[in-house]
Image (cartoon, grey):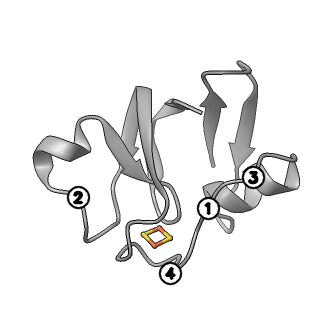
Amino acid sequence: AFEVRLASSGKTYTVQADESIPEVLRRNGVQVDVSCEEGYCGTCMTRYVGGQPEHRDSVLDDANRRSYVMICCARAKEGPLILDI
Ligand code: FES
């Protein structure tokens, strides 16, 4: 499990091994756009401002990975992963 925090609200949520970030956010009333949910369409691209994501998408290049994360499939190596939403 790892933690994800929203920069706007400051709220922190725990993402268990068997769930995705969008699943957890939606369950807590935070709507996020997803489509493929497999890391290739780009719909869920989200800026992050803290933490160290474990990227699992096939869209972002190394430069973009310093600021953006595909939340449908990403995990966090070091949390909380702070999303700019
Ligand atoms: Fe397609 Fe995340 S929903 S890359």
Three-letter code, disc 2: Leu
The numbered mark at residue 31 is: 3
| Residues at marks 3 and 1, CA–CA distance in whole angstroms | 7 Å
The numbered mark at residue 52 is: none
Q: Which residue is mark 1?
A: 33
| Residues at marks 2 and 4, CA–CA distance in whole angstroms | 15 Å
**Number of other residues with Cα within 10 Å of mark 4, as a class: few under 14, some 14 to 19, many 20 or more:** few
Q: Where does residue 38 sit, x and y in percent of width and height?
A: 45, 78
Q: Which residue is mark 4?
A: 36
* Discs 2/1, front: 1
Three-letter code, disc 1: Asp
What residue is rendered at 64% in x and 29% in y?
Answer: 6
Three-letter code, disc 4: Cys
Mark 2 or mark 1: name the one nearer the start of the chain.
Answer: 1
Q: Which residue is mark 2?
A: 60
Mark 2 or mark 4: name the one nearer the start of the chain.
Answer: 4
Q: Where does residue 50 sit, x and y in percent of width and height?
A: 43, 23
